[in-house]
Amino acid sequence: MSDTLVAEKKPVAGNIHGIESWPVQRTGKSRLKETNFSHLPFGHVFSDHMLVADYADGAWREVGIVPFGAITLSPANLTLHYGQSIFEGIKAYKNQQGEAAIFRPDKNFDRFLKSAKRMAMPSVPREIFLDGMMQLVALDKDWIPTEEGSSLYIRPLMFATDDLIGVKPGKKYKFILFTSPTGPYYNKPLKLYVEDYYVRACEGGVGAAKTAGNYAASLYPTEEVIRKGFDQILWTDAKEHQYLQECGTMNLFVVINGKVLTAGLDKGTILDGVTRDSVIQILRGQGIDVEERLVSIAELISAHQDGSLQEVFGSGTAANIIFISDMQYHGQNIALKPHKQWEIAPMLLKELNDLHYGRIEDTREWMWRV
Ligand SMILES: Cc1ncc(COP(=O)(O)O)c(C=O)c1O
């Protein structure tokens, strides 16, 4: 589908980076002062403005920034029935000088376009997704928390807006980008349940797309394992339940004998995580071996038994780097060594945090200054 841009960009006085900006309708009543920045549970507080764009007749129109608020939908809205809905998750941080920067938003833009293609949706122009994001974050810059572990979570999404019933791709879409100041996602190492019945993704499916149905399908199995006392599911492959995929909203890394292993992207069953890619680049940059390949539960158990299993950790925008304390497979507990003895995951956590909060030089140009 085409991504023609029909809307006119209107330069706004004092705009950032010299990029032209979208029209802004500022809120008359900012909620900033009444927001408690020392209590920011993930995804509950939203900043003052959002960017909205509508697609119809093969082109994006009516792009602009407006006060954050509700939208109305017909009960016949196509997405409510057939689930053409995709989204992204990105974070903006403030350094000690109070300057704001967004972590690798271009990677999320690329992934959003791939998700759109898989879900038979139109692509969104870069000027809307990336320039719009920069403009929105600049406008609501005072909403970026400064405490370590806190950030401004950026949520772009797109869904079909046709008001009709019938299983076919929509002809109309809405793109919205809003932001949410947030504290840490998890605050302790996680216990994982290695899933051997339910499935997150299969070859030929939509596991590589960041689409709503993937998350809906994970809810019931996840609630079941939480009831059993675990924090998250570690998904395995759909055919044999032998190969590790990912866990919750994170990619998974295993360290065996100094070598870092993670599931490859070639089967289309893994979300191509921006943090995953960053972790791999940082590790390879330090000369640490990373293998992107099938990792079996048998390999994990055998490494646990012979003592060569060193670390298991998850990576994701919301959670950052999260240490795994235990994994249970067929009633057998695989307990990891105390993470005080770990080297790789703590190093990655420090490196990423230092980069996010501007404490080290950004040699890879991952932080996009707002
Ligand atoms: C299923 C899934 N896997 C992995 C990730 C990690 O991806 P990223 O590092 O881009 O946040 C996410 C979060 O976006 C996710 O939802």
Image: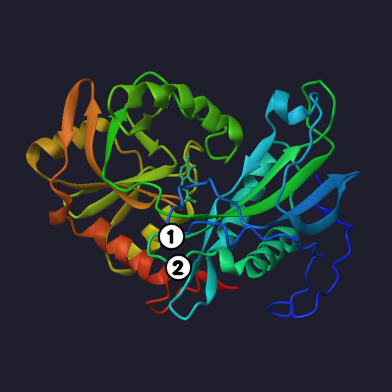
Q: Residue furthest front?
A: 34
Whether residue 6 sits left or right of residue 352 in the image: it is: right
Q: Residues within 10 Å of mark 1 (few under 14, many from 20)?
A: many
Residue 351: % across, % down: 33, 67
Q: Amino acid at mark 1?
A: Ser
Answer above or below: position of 117 versus 286: above
Answer above or below: position of 350 versus 18: above
The residue identified by callout 2 is 146
Residue 366: % across, % down: 50, 69
Q: Amino acid at mark 2?
A: Thr
* Mark 2 and mark 1 residues within 8 Å of each other at the beta carbon: yes
Q: Residue furthest top?
A: 197
Residue that appears at 31% across and 61% down: 348
Q: Is residue 204 visible?
A: no
The residue identified by callout 1 is 150
Circle 1: element type: loop
The label on residue 12 is: none
- 259, 144: nearer the viewer: 144
Residue 346: image quadrant is: bottom left
Whether residue 346 sits left or right of residue 184 in the image: it is: left
